[in-house]
Image (spheres, helix red, strand yellow):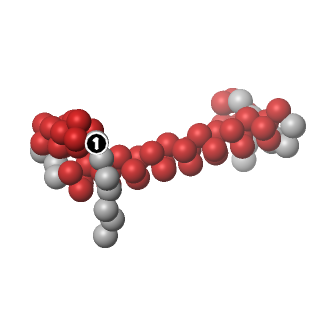
Amino acid sequence: MLSLRLEKEDERLIREYARFYGMTVSEFLRKAAIERIEDEYDLNALKDYERRKNDGELELYDHDEVWSRP
């Protein structure tokens, strides 16, 4: 279980948003937190890919090369 302190205006905004989308506050906060973590994970994976691509660590193939492979 978690406890969270919010300013009254922030609490009102969160409650109204959750209600508008038919969620409880807990459901909304859980979903928002998980999405944030997933977004950061995806961004880090993309940054790693770009770094490896720029460092020449990846072997890249175009569409025709992929389909012509045995």
**In the current view of this chain or complex, which residue is farthest to the right?**
56
Mark 1 neighbour class, 10 Å CA radius: few under 14, some 14 to 19, many 20 or more = few
- Lateral position of residue 41 relative to residue 3, left or right: right
Q: Position of residue 5 (x, y in %)?
A: 31, 53
Of the 4 image quadrants, the one containing the N terminus is bottom left
Q: Nearer the viewer, residue 5 or 28?
A: 5
Q: Does residue 64 appear left or right of residue 11 in this picture?
A: right
Q: Quadrant of residue 57?
A: top right
Give amino acid for label 1. Answer: Glu
Where does residue 65 sit, x and y in percent of width and height? 73, 34
Query: Residue 8 sits in which quadrant?
Result: top left
Q: Residue furthest bottom?
A: 1
Percent x, y of residue 24: 16, 52
Q: Quadrant of residue 56?
A: top right
The residue that appears at 72% across and 47% down in the rendered structure is 70
Residue drawn 82% across and 32% down? 54
Q: Residue at x 40, y 52 (%)?
A: 34
Residue wearing tag 1: 7
Q: Residue at x 64, y 39 (%)?
A: 46
Residue 44 rendering spot, x and y as whole percentages: 63, 44
